[in-house]
Every structure is written in C-alpha cells, then in structure tokens.
Amino acid sequence: MLQEMTTLTHLECSLCGAKHEAGRAWNLCSCGGPLLVRYDLDAARRSWSREWLAGAPASMWRYAPVLPVSNPASMVTLGEGWTPMVRARRYEAALGAESVWIKDEGMNRTASFKARGLSCCISMCRELGVDRVAIGSAGNAAGAAAAYAAAAGMEAHIFMPRDVPQANYVECQSYGARVTLVDGLISDCGRLVAEGAARGEWFEINTLKEPYRIEGKKTMGYEVAEQLQWKLPDAIFYPTGGGVGLIGMWKAFDEMEALGWIGPERPKMIVVQAAGCAPVVKAFEEGKERAEFWQNANTISAGLRVPKPLGDFLILSAVRASGGTCIAVEDREALEAGARVARLEGIFASPEGAACFAALEKLMRSGFLRPSDRIVIFNTGSGLKYLEAYSILFPRPDSSEADKLGGLITPR
C-alpha cells in the first residue's frame, strides 16, 4: 500500500523561473523552457521517512509523495522501476576496478528505462483528462508510450524514424498504437508531433515537452541512493540522447537532500554519447551552455541519435556542477564492450548501455577515475531489442538466415 500520494505544489520553468499552477495539462513555459514539478518537501519530510520504504511497493511508486499523481485511481502502472543493482565483480577484476555496479533498466516493462517516464506521464494524462497523446521517438519511448496508453485505454500516435529497430516497430503495432514511420531523425518526428498538437489533434508528450516524464525518470536517482544504502556513488555513467534521466536524477538528489536522506555530496555525472551524434560532448568541450544541432547524425544506438536535446543546458549544468565529464564512443567500441560485459556478467546491454562500459574503460585508462571509485553504470535497455545492431559482431554463417531476427523459424 502507498502511504500517501503527492505533495506537489506547482510547476516551475527551468529557464525563467515562472510558476505555473498544477492541475492542468501543460507543455512548455511561454518562454520556451521545460517545466519542472515542485513539491512541499517539508511536508513530505514530516510524514514520510526512509524507514517506511522497507515495506513499500517494489516499483517506482514507492516514492509516491514526490511523484505528481494525486489520485491512486489515475495510476497506470505495469510494475516499472525498482530494477536490479548488480555488482559486476568479474568485470571489475578484468578492468582493475574495485566497485562497479550495473543498474539494469532492461528489466523494466517494455525492456527499457522509458517505462518509468511514460508510466508517470500517461498517469498524469489520465488524471488531467487527456485521451489522445502523440510522441516522436527513436524507439524505446515509443514502445513504452504505446504500452502505457494501451493499459490506460488511451489513443496513442507514434512517430518514429523509418530505420527504427524492428522490435520497437512491432511492439508499437502490437499495442494498437497508430504508427507513422518518418524519413528522417527523431527531430523530424518531433516536429510532426508538435504540428499536430498545434492543430489540436493530440497532447504532445515529446521529451521535456511536458513536465511528468522527468518525474518518472528521476526515480532512478532515488533507487541508486536506496540500493546503495543512502551513500551515492563516486560516478554515474549515463547514455545521453535527450538526457531526461540524468536531469531527473540530478533533481532527485536535491530533493533527497532537502528530505534529509542524503548529504550534499554528489557523484560525477558522466554523459556518454555516440561519436556519430555527440552534440552535448561538443558543447561541453567548447565550454558552451547550449548544444548546436548535430548534422548528419549517424549511430547504431537508436536512443543516442538525438541531434539536439531540448534540455541540453540542464544536462551541461549538472555535469559541470558535479565535476563530471562528457565522452563520445564509436559504435563498434560500444558493441564490443557490450559483448564483453555479457560474457563476464550475463547481462545483455543495449548499445546505449554498452557505450557506457566503453566510456568507463577509456576514463579508467586516462586516470579521470580511480580504481577505488564506486561506479554505477546505467544499462538503459535490453540488448534483445537491438539484435540488428549486435549482428554486426555476430553475423550468422548461413546468409539465408541473416534476416531471421527475433526467433522466426520457417520450413527448410
């Protein structure tokens, strides 16, 4: 049972600081800034405690007082969150590190971390009376949006690049979503969603275009703290396309400090991007506060093919405040690192998560991180959704079988 629901008070613009009332469906602030949810953390501190969590639901909704849903009947949940934190002992030994943990988000419903944000978002859409939603996605957010909209009995319109992984396309169709494949990138998909929203065809739930996906994603930060006995790690590696999870975790750390659950120490936040699409890395290296649009974005890591994240300024601010860094990884480096971790730990990471292992290896060699540092790697999805990508490393010897991904068996 949930102890209580939300302590939400209002929404606040991340750019201009303007306050917006709760209780209605918002997209961006009038200045164009993403909106952040604010809570009465003093009230939450008086009525809620770390000790209570011992008997809380084994899902992200264990943190209900700092999530925005006010009515339990509005919750659209498939058991998302409270994913395993796995000690990577054999990988540690191979790397020469002392403490590496894998937060395996591939264990979520829809097999990626996107389940968290879309559970919270669709729950709030239900609470606020929204019955049609639309999203532009590189794949996993689309699958999660389709799944949670189906669970809510809500109409979902999905826009994805035409070369999206087959698993994402099939799952969206299976959930009954209305799917449009777009000749372009996620930015082109997002534009079509925004145009339809302006015509009143649906409510837009693109990344950071509404305030509630970040709230579901921030629960990753709460879980890292709780699963590590309320002592944050020295570094967190996060594969960054839109970067909502990193922004959310940084927000969660501030909330937990206000609740008295952790101190002021923060982990180094390490952004990992693909070499073929690294707008945040470039902005970081050039000392800029905003990223430039990355031309000709190209990577097998579908979730990292985001030419310009809307929340770039929030990502860069968190990285710099934490003493972290931003690093780009080649596609093959990522896949090879993912295969190494699979052999050593039995965890099959998405290419996005695999890129973090390659990045860790680089930063250990460079001396940016010490062997004694306690490190958390976010694997944001299951490698099973990216068989086309991994087939680069493991082509089948019989070429007639090469396109039979996903277990398709036909007569011989």
Image (cartoon, rainbow, N blue to C red):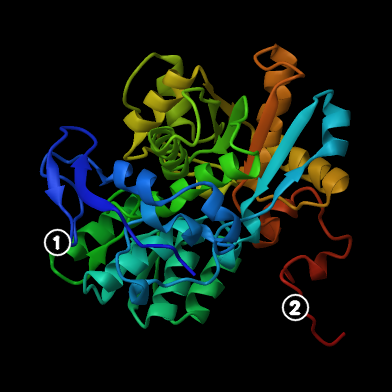
> 178 or 276, which is in the foreground?
178
Vertical comparison of 397 with 38: above or below = below
The residue positioned 55% from the left and 58% from the top of the image is 81
Question: Can you give x and y, in whole percent of width and height, for residue 17 in the image?
Answer: 16, 34
Identify the residue under disc 1: 198
Element type where label 1 sits in the image: helix
- Mark carried by residue 342: none
- The residue lying toward the viewer, choosing from 335 and 212, is 212
Instruction: Kindly give the residue lying farthest to the front in the view shown.
Output: 46
Is residue 244 depicted above or below 270 in this figure?
Answer: below
Q: Earlier in the sequence, mark 2 or mark 1?
A: 1
Amino acid at the residue labelled 1: Ala
Give left or right: position of 410 versus 248: right
Q: Residues within 10 Å of mark 1 (few under 14, many from 20)?
A: few
The residue type indicated by label 2 comes to Leu
Placement of 275 over or under 8, stated as above or below: above
> Which residue is label 2 attached to?
408
> Would you identify the image quadrant in which residue 131 lies?
bottom left
Residue 177 visible here: no
Neighbourhood count class around disc 2 (C-alpha, 10 Å): few under 14, some 14–19, many 20 upward: few
**Residue 88 spot, x, y in % from top left:** 80, 40
Q: Position of residue 235 (x, y in %)?
A: 61, 27
Point 60% across, 67% down: residue: 167
- Residue 80 to residue 408: above or below: above
Q: Return the residue found at the far bottom.
A: 411
Tag 2 secondary structure:
loop
Quadrant holding the C terminus: bottom right
